[in-house]
Amino acid sequence: MAMLHGLFRSALRAALAPMVFLLSLPCFSQLYRADLDADFNGDGVIGNAMDSPDTDFIQHVPPGLRVKVGKLEELVLRLNSLYPEEGVVELTVVSQPDAATYVGNTADIPAMKPGGGGIRVWDSATKMSLVLDSHDGTLQSASWVLAPGRGIGNIPDRLYAEGTKESLAPGDLCLLLRYWKGKRVIAQDEIVVTVGNP
Ligand SMILES: [Ca+2]
Ligand SMILES: [Ca+2]
């Protein structure tokens, strides 16, 4: 009986192997993708070889992105979706001493009293419209609903983070980009942020 069991498991593994291989290919693993990037190494360029791809830890480990009080740092949002007119894309800021532990969070994050550094996130380099404010409970999260005629192309591909309050500890801010489908996060990325004085 045990031998039959083993044979069945081996046969099942062999049958599923091509499917697992296909799903691991970049073209399939990118069906849903949420990527948040910035100039982590401070060379003025976003996305060069020295910047972190998603798999690198530089953006997830304090100090992460360094932002100065009163200065803007460009953020790049990249989203891919098999169904670009379904779901909700959400950007949330957390200001807490343990902000870096929010990396990988897939639960709802309630508005909370800020306990770390401060940032605002603007829609443009000219600060036309405020998207997030870590120290305003009504602006700690922003979301974009995807619907027919309002797909991923309507979500900003660039935003601008401005330091408003110096960090109390490295990485006490976290920006979370999450792509929800129903109650499930299907793609996400995060940036840990430290605010310093100029
Ligand atoms: Ca990234
Ligand atoms: Ca760079």
Image (cartoon, rainbow, N blue to C red):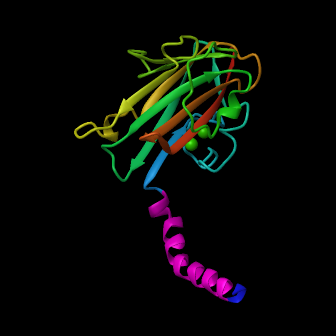
Asked whether, in this view, residue 91 is left or right of residue 113, the answer is left
When the figure is inspected, residue 190 is found, relative to residue 7, above or below; the finding is above
Does the magenta-highlighted stretch encompass residue 26? yes
Locate residue 121, reporting x and y percent.
50, 20
Residue 27 appears in which quarter of the rendering?
bottom left
At 36% from the left and 34% from the top, the residue drawn is 155
Q: Quadrant of the N terminus?
A: bottom right
> Magenta stretch mostly in which secondary structure?
helix
Q: Nearer the viewer, residue 103 or 62?
A: 103
In depth, the one of 104 and 46 nearer the eye is 104
Extreme residue toward the right, this view: 169
Q: Which residue sits at x=46%, y=56%?
A: 30
Furthest-left residue in this view: 149
- Position above or below: 8 against 22: below
Q: Depth check: 193 or 38 in front?
A: 193
Residue 127: horizontal and vertical position, in percent? 43, 15
Between residue 14 and residue 62, name the one nearer to us.
14
Q: What residue is shown at x 37% (from left), y 30% (from top)?
A: 144
Number of residue marks: 0
Instruction: Work out whether 52 lies above or below 9.
Output: above
Residue plotted at (64% across, 18% down): 68
Q: Quadrant of residue 103?
A: top right
Q: Which quadrant holds the C terminus?
A: top right
- Ligand 2 shows up in the quarter that is top right
Give the image location of residue 31, x and y in percent: 43, 55
* 82 to the left or right of 76: left
Pinpoint residue 183: horizontal percent, then vertical percent: 46, 39
The segment highlighted magenta reads 4-29
Residue 177 is inside the magenta segment:
no
